[in-house]
Image: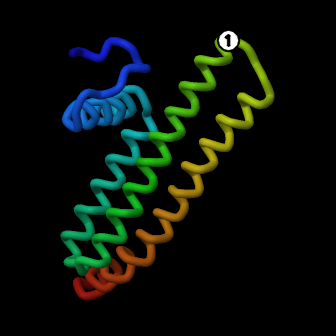
Amino acid sequence: MKREASWQIATNLFISFKYAWAGISYAFQTQRNFRIHVVIGSAAIGLGVFLHLTAVEMAVIGLTIAAVMATELLNTAIESLVDMSMPQTYHELAKIAKDCAAGAVLVSSVAAILVAGCLLLPPLVALIQSHL
C-alpha cells in the first residue's frame, strides 16, 4: 500500500527508512545551508583521514557533523510547519519559533567549529611545520 497522506503509518521498517531518506533528500535539494554543512562535514572527514586521526577523534568529528545536520533538519521541519500554519502572514510567535530553530543550528555549528579546531588544527599545523 502506498502512503498518499502524511497521517498514514508506515507499513514496515523499510518504508520508514524510505520516508526518512526523503526528508534528507528534500533538505539537500532545497536548503542551501544543509548542502554547505554536507560539504564542510565531508571536508572535515577527509581531512581527518588525511591527518590519520584516531578512531575516537574521527567518531567525535562524525557525531559533531551528525548533530549539525540533525539540527538543520529539525530547523527545516520547524520552518515548514510554521510556514504551513501561518501562510503569508506575520506573527511574533512564528518569528520566535523560526529564530530559535535557526539559533539551534548556529549553536551546533559553532560547537562543530570548536571541535574541528581542537582535533584538526594541531596535527595540521604540525604537518605544515614539518614541511617548512
Q: Position of residue 77 (x, y in %)?
A: 51, 32
Indicate whether 11 appears above or below 108.
above
Give the labeled residue for mark 1.
88
Amino acid found under the numbered disc labelled 1: Gln
Of 22 and 40, nearer the camera is: 22
Q: Is residue 43 left or right of residue 68?
A: left
Of 125 and 27, nearer the camera is: 27
In the rendered image, the quadrant that contains the C terminus is: bottom left
Res 94 quadrant in image: top right
Indicate whether 69 appears above or below 48.
above
Q: Position of residue 55 (x, y in %)?
A: 23, 77
Q: Position of residue 1 (x, y in %)?
A: 21, 15
Indicate whether 103 appears above or below 120.
above
Res 75 quadrant in image: top right
Residue beneath the point at 38% across and 55% down: 66
Res 30 quadrant in image: top left
Residue beneath the point at 28% across and 54% down: 42
